[in-house]
Amino acid sequence: MQKNSIFLKTVCLTLSLAIFALTFCGCGSKQEKTNIEPMEAEEPDVYGFEFLGGTDVMPIAGYYGPLPSTFSVDGQSLPDYISDEFLKKISESGINLLHHQYTDFSTNPSLVRKLLDLGEKYDIGVCVYDNRIRGNLAEDTLGVEDIDELVNDYRNYPAFCGLYIVDEPTSDNYYSNHSNPRMSNYTKLFSNLKQLGIFSYSNLFPMTTASNREQYEKYLQEYIDTCDVYYLSWDKYVFDKGNSKADYFLNMSLCREYAEKANIPFWPYIQAGSQWNDAASRFDTNGYYPNEGEFDWNVNTCLAYGAKGIQYFPLIQPYYFAYAMSSDFDFERNGIFGAWGNKNRWFYYAKNINAQISAVDEVLMNSVNKGIIATGDDAKKDNKDSQFLIEGDGWRELEGVEGDSLIGCFNYKGKSAFYVVNYDTEYAQKITLRLTKRYNLSVIQGAKEAFISADALELTLAAGEGVLVVVE
């Protein structure tokens, strides 16, 4: 299938790029320095779905839903999300993969087939929930041949991208008293699915604080050693109470480290709203967050660290996540979509940032991240415990940086690429990249590409915004 073209390739600059083009294109006074030797091209750890366009296309996933209408509010049924209308809305958001719909093939195969058909229509991959397979665990796990026969019920649907297996398994090393199932119950199943070449959804707990780093690393090590998976996923919601940006980056650094040990990519979760309600209790909403700058910062910092997939939670607000007190329900508290089917503010945030992802993913998916540069007091402080922090503010053609930023440094097929993130989540700012000499650059900002020759590049970035710069 053809990947939809999201961005326009043009030699004309966007408004913000036009400013620095006029400022720097004419500069020729800097004394030329020794040429930077090209790097050897490296093979990235990446996983892609042929249905979505292969390894050039970044998976952009949503967790929770769509599901059929099984609940009602004040006598009125909530929407049936497995519908043409709703899949079209998901497609408009830029999400291209569905992880978990709570629609079990073993009990409702017609709805799952309908979802697969709609996924094909709107270019959205589907991970099937099949309790005949994931429900047989530990010593009772089905064998390879048995699984292969069951998957024949839907594997030929073009939108079929794999199976949902488990979310946040526990272990003796981590969350040992939690009610979630044990990681050890799934090791044989992951192995069997790997033999069949079937992608399997699995997601780990986050590290709660740096104080339990040792236990968390044992948890990651057990996962890598015993679960033969295609990627490493976890959910650290940085804007929730009790979390810090320093713990967020340490968690990402550790997950990246263990993913690299296993030669697999890592896919972080992004916070679409807040004030989760697993306890199904009633409380009044305490403001709406994250804002757009925070949301974009969350996505863009993950891209700068080398993520090869982005996941949003929740895609659709679970109805019990909407429980309120004074107004009974708050359908705007969290979710790309509210439980009433409404587009929440995070729908519009996701739509914009997903367009940027689709504009830069060919480069990022085919690149190897060599580390990150942090400039400004906050970025340096928050990333000080990351083993991937590059000392100083230069790397290869990049001689120095002015502004508060987080910059991912990549080997893109032997060329240098930089993913530059405005570290400020509240305000726009100018970030200047000083280069060792004049270079031809490709710059992708706001899902549009521009070309420029410069020895210094002044970028005007909105709060939390990210820009890709490739040295041609």
Image: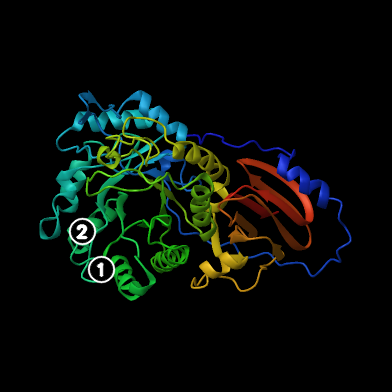
Work out which residue is located at the far front of the displayed protein and give it: 326
Name the foreground residue: 356 vs 411. Answer: 356
Give left or right: position of 192 versus 214.
left
Under mark 2, the amino acid is Tyr
Name the foreground residue: 456 vs 336. Answer: 336
- The residue under label 2 is 186
- Res. 122 visible in picture: no
Question: Reading the chain from its start, which is encountered first: label 2 or label 1?
Answer: 1
The percent position of residue 35, horizontal first and vertical second, equals 77, 67
- Res. 292 visible in picture: yes
The percent position of residue 427, horizontal first and vertical second, equals 61, 50
Rendered view: 140 above or below 386: above
Q: Report how far apart the C-alphas of labels 2 and 1 lie in the structure.
A: 16 Å
Rendered view: 95 above or below 368: above
Residue appearing at x 47%, y 48% in the figure: 55
Work out which residue is located at the far bottom of the displayed protein and give it: 214
Name the foreground residue: 144 vs 140. Answer: 140
> Dot 2: few (<14), some (14–19), or many (≥20) neighbours within 10 Å?
many
Give the number of callouts: 2
Q: Do the residues labelled 2 and 1 touch (CB within 8 Å)?
A: no
Under mark 1, the amino acid is Tyr
Q: Tag 1's secondary structure?
A: loop
Which image quadrant is residue 73 in? Answer: top left
Q: Tag 2's secondary structure?
A: helix
The percent position of residue 311, horizontal first and vertical second, equals 40, 48
Q: In which quarter of the image is the C terminus?
A: bottom right
- The residue under label 1 is 174
The percent position of residue 171, horizontal first and vertical second, equals 22, 66
- Which one is in front in this view, the residue at disc 2 or the one at disc 1? 1
Which image quadrant is residue 369 in? Answer: bottom right
Name the foreground residue: 170 vs 382. Answer: 382
